Amino acid sequence: MSEREYDAIVLGAGPAGEVCAGRLAGGGMKVAIVERHLIGGECSYYACMPSKALLRPGDLLAEARRVPGPGSKNGGSTSTVARPASTASADSSSATTS
C-alpha cells in the first residue's frame, strides 16, 4: 500500500463531515474522508429525506381533494380564483345605489 499525505482527515461522512471536508478542500487543503457506513449519513438514504418524499405526495393529494374547484365531485366552483366576501358585498351595495 502506498503512502499518501493529507492536510486533514475527516472522520465521518455524514452531513457535518461532508460540509467540513468540502470547506477544507475549498480552502485548498488536501482532504480525506473516512466513513464506515453511509456517505451523507443515514438521513440521505432511509431517514429524513426519503420518508418526507414518501409522505408529502399523499398529504398534497389529500389537500387537493379537500378543496373544491374545477372537476370536483361536490359541485365546486369552476373558477380557480376566489373573491373575498368583503369585496363582493361592497360591490353589490355600490351597484344598488348607483
Image (cartoon, helix red, strand yellow):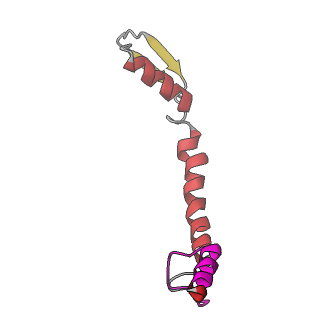
* Residue 88 rendering spot, x and y as whole percentages: 60, 79
User: In which quadrant is the C terminus drawn?
Assistant: bottom right
Name the foreground residue: 30 vs 36: 30
**Above or below — where is 16 with respect to 85?**
above
Q: Is residue 71 left or right of residue 5?
A: right
* Residue 14 rendering spot, x and y as whole percentages: 55, 32
User: In which quadrant is the N terminus drawn?
Assistant: top left
Counting the numbered discs, the total is: 0
* Residue 91 rendering spot, x and y as whole percentages: 57, 80
What residue appears at the point 56 percent right and 75 percent down from the top-left corner?
A: 83
**Above or below — where is 69 with respect to 59?**
below
What residue appears at the point 57 percent right and 73 percent down from the top-left corner?
A: 64
**Above or below — where is 8 with respect to 56?**
above
Q: Is residue 21 something that shows in the picture?
A: yes
Quarter of the image for residue 90 reads bottom right
Q: Is residue 63 left or right of residue 30?
A: right
What residue appears at the point 62 percent right and 89 percent down from the top-left corner?
A: 74
Where are the magenta residues, as a range?
72-94
Taking the view exactly as shown, the residue that stands out farthest to the front is 98
* Residue 8 rendering spot, x and y as whole percentages: 46, 12
- Taking the magenta stretch, the answer to whether it contains residue 77 is yes
Q: Is residue 76 something that shows in the picture?
A: no
Quarter of the image for residue 22 reads top left
**Above or below — where is 32 with respect to 15?**
above
Name the foreground residue: 59 vs 34: 59
Name the foreground residue: 30 vs 3: 30
- Taking the magenta stretch, the answer to whether it contains residue 78 is yes
